[in-house]
Each structure stands twice: as C-alpha cells, then as structure tokens.
Amino acid sequence: MKKILITGANGQLGRSLMNTLSGKYQVMGTKIENEPIANPGMPLIQMDITNRTEVEAGVNLFKPDIIINTAAFTNVDRSEIDQDLAWSVNVGGIENLIRASDSDTKFIHISSDYVFDGENGPYRESDEVNPTSYYGKSKLWGEQKLLDSERKYLILRPNVLYQTTTHDQASFFAWVYTSLLNKKQIKVVTDQTSNPTWVHPFTEVLLRSIDSDLCGLFHYGSADYISRFDFAQLIANIFNLDSSLIAPIITADLNQAAPRPKHSGLISDKIQNKLDVEVLTVEQCLLQIKRLWERVSD
Ligand SMILES: NC(=O)c1ccc[n+]([C@@H]2O[C@H](COP(=O)([O-])OP(=O)(O)OC[C@H]3O[C@@H](n4cnc5c(N)ncnc54)[C@H](OP(=O)(O)O)[C@@H]3O)[C@@H](O)[C@H]2O)c1
C-alpha cells in the first residue's frame, strides 16, 4: 500500500484528504505542536514545515511515496505585512520537504489562483502568471521550487476553497454563513469574480489523480463564475439566512493590505478531460452541503 504524507492535516483540505484517502492508502498527517486534532483517531505527527529538523525527522520516520502539501500560510493580508513568515511556510516549507525526501517521492502541491493578477480571468494553466500580492508571489515561488527540484509533481490550483464545515478561518463560505447565522451585518465585494472550489469534489479530484498517477499543472473550480457578493447572496438564499445583512461594497473601499485579483477564476477543462471528473455549479455544491447537513441531523 502506498504511503502518503499529508501536511496541514488540520486544515480545510487536509482534513478531507485524511478521511478520504485513509481507507485506500497508508496516510500520515502532520500537525503543528499544540494544535487541536481535528480528525480523532487519524495518525498524525508533529511537523512545522518551516522547521528543517522536524521535517527531516518526520519524513525519515514515515518514508512517504507521495507528499501532499496542503500546509500554507493562507492569510492574504497578513502575508503582505509579515512577508518573512509567508515566505518561510509557502516557499521554505516546500524546500524543506523536498530536501528531506527521497528523490523518487512524488509531490502533490496545492497552489492558488492568486498567482494571476486577476485582470482578465478566468484562467487556463497556460496563461501567464503575474501575482500582485505577497501571498500570490509566495505561492508562485513555492510552485517554482518544486519545478526546479525536478521531482515528479502534480500542482493543483483551486480558488476560494471552502469546506462543508463552518468554523474554518480560511473559508469565505464559513465566514458568510456564521456571520449571517449570528445576525451580523457584513460587507461583501461586488467586483471580485471567481468560481469557488468546494473541498468535497476537489478531494475526489485528488483521489483520482493519485489513482491514475496524474502529473503536471491543473486548475479546478466550479462550473460557473460569480462575484463574492452573489456567492454570499446564494449562501443566504439556500440556507434560509437573512440576505439583507449583506451590504455590497467595492474592493477599493475595503482598504485591505494586499491587492486582490478581480477577474479571477480557474478553467477546469484540462483536468475534467483527463480524469472525467464532475464539475458542479456553485448552487449545486451548496445544495449538496445542505443535504449533507440534513442527513446528519436526521
Ligand atoms: N482557502 C482558500 O480560499 C484557498 C484558495 C486557493 C488556494 N488555497 C490553497 O489551498 C491549500 C489548502 O488551504 P486551506 O483552505 O485548507 O487552508 P487552511 O485551512 O488554512 O489550512 C492550512 C493548514 O496549514 C497549516 N500550516 C500553517 N503553517 C504551517 C507550518 N508552518 N507548518 C505546518 N503546517 C502549517 C495550518 O495549520 P493551523 O491549523 O495551525 O493554522 C493549517 O492546518 C493551501 O495551499 C492554500 O494556499 C486556499
């Protein structure tokens, strides 16, 4: 049975991968010291990917055939301010993992649509990259480290990633849902377009990629492109929350530390043709989440 090391096992994508891959592959997740264990019973080792010694110890102990690197510093505005930290996780982390592993270890690395400037998306894999934020730059440099290593690789780029759960800090869906549930007024931008990636089908894409030993660079998002404002409205409508709490705003008025891609989105044709995976609309994804929650509460 192939051995797969999953970094960031407490994160949105990491948790889903731990659950989905564990029956089929021998998986080991990594967590940072003192972090809560989100998947009780799942095998986890302590590993801060910025710590070379810890990475070497963990990789040597488990000897993975495949490393899936979902760990990242995902706070876009903080990355602009604390650039050293963003670099050490998003670039130095992958460098440490490459250095610590055998040369025949395959890398599956999760990147982002923020490698594009968002002037004229949606984007294909062949489109020119031009990150405008430090977070986007660090994600691109992370990709480059992997390409330079000449390791066997798969790089997957999702956008506006969200879990089925509502407590994840890196999830726009969770932020909108919990704010509206708590009757909190929110301002949401009308001028940023994307095709959000629900973790559930994305994990299926990853599973099929591993099964078929897919290599290369691929994008994956939903079937339709919507603004953050329309996404928030859809969340309110589907989960019967008060949409009047969502006020429209434009990106410039938010005065955020990091610039954001406005016309983003990732065209999924290449991976859809390779793996014959389903690409759902945003509405279909949200309705599936609702049905999953209803089933659990039955
Ligand atoms: N969220 C999005 O909207 C989005 C969009 C496009 C691409 N992506 C990419 O998709 C991937 C998964 O994102 P996600 O949404 O699942 O992020 P997430 O929920 O923030 O999870 C990231 C994980 O990385 C861990 N981590 C952070 N620093 C680390 C370090 N130094 N050593 C080891 N682990 C560390 C975090 O640990 P803690 O739990 O301690 O923080 C967390 O478990 C990332 O590569 C991200 O860049 C995300």
Image: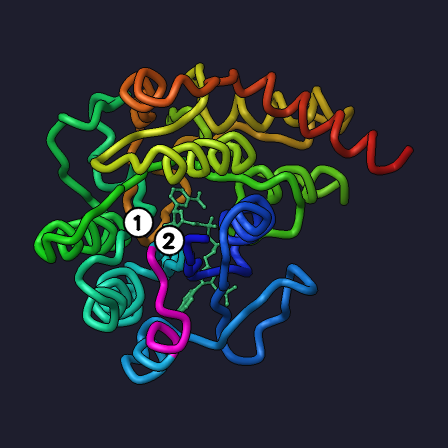
| Residue segment shown in magenta | 58-65
From this view, report whether residue 264 is shown above or below residue 34: above
Q: Which secondary structure, mark 1?
A: strand
* Mark 2 vs 1: CB contact within 8 A: yes
Q: Is mark 1 within 8 Å of ligand 1?
A: yes
Q: Is residue 51 above or below residue 42?
A: below
Q: Amino acid at mark 2?
A: Ile
Q: Is residue 83 shown to the viewer in this render?
A: no
Mark 1 = which residue? 109
Split into 4 quadrants, where in the image is the C terminus? top right
Residue 115 left/right relative to 19: left
Disc number for residue 210: none
Element under label 2? strand
Q: Quadrant of residue 217?
A: top left
Q: Position of residue 26 (x, y in %)?
A: 50, 57
Q: Magenta region, mostly helix, strand or loop?
A: helix
Q: Which residue is mark 2?
A: 68
Which is nearer the N-term, disc 2 or disc 1?
2
Image-based side of 62 in relation to 260, left or right: right
Specify whether residue 166 is painted magenta. no
Q: Which class describes the residues within 10 Å of circle 2: few (<14), some (14-19), or many (20+)?
A: many
Q: Give the number of marks.
A: 2
Please state which amino acid type lies under the numbered disc 1.
His
Inspect this view and state whether residue 172 appears.
yes
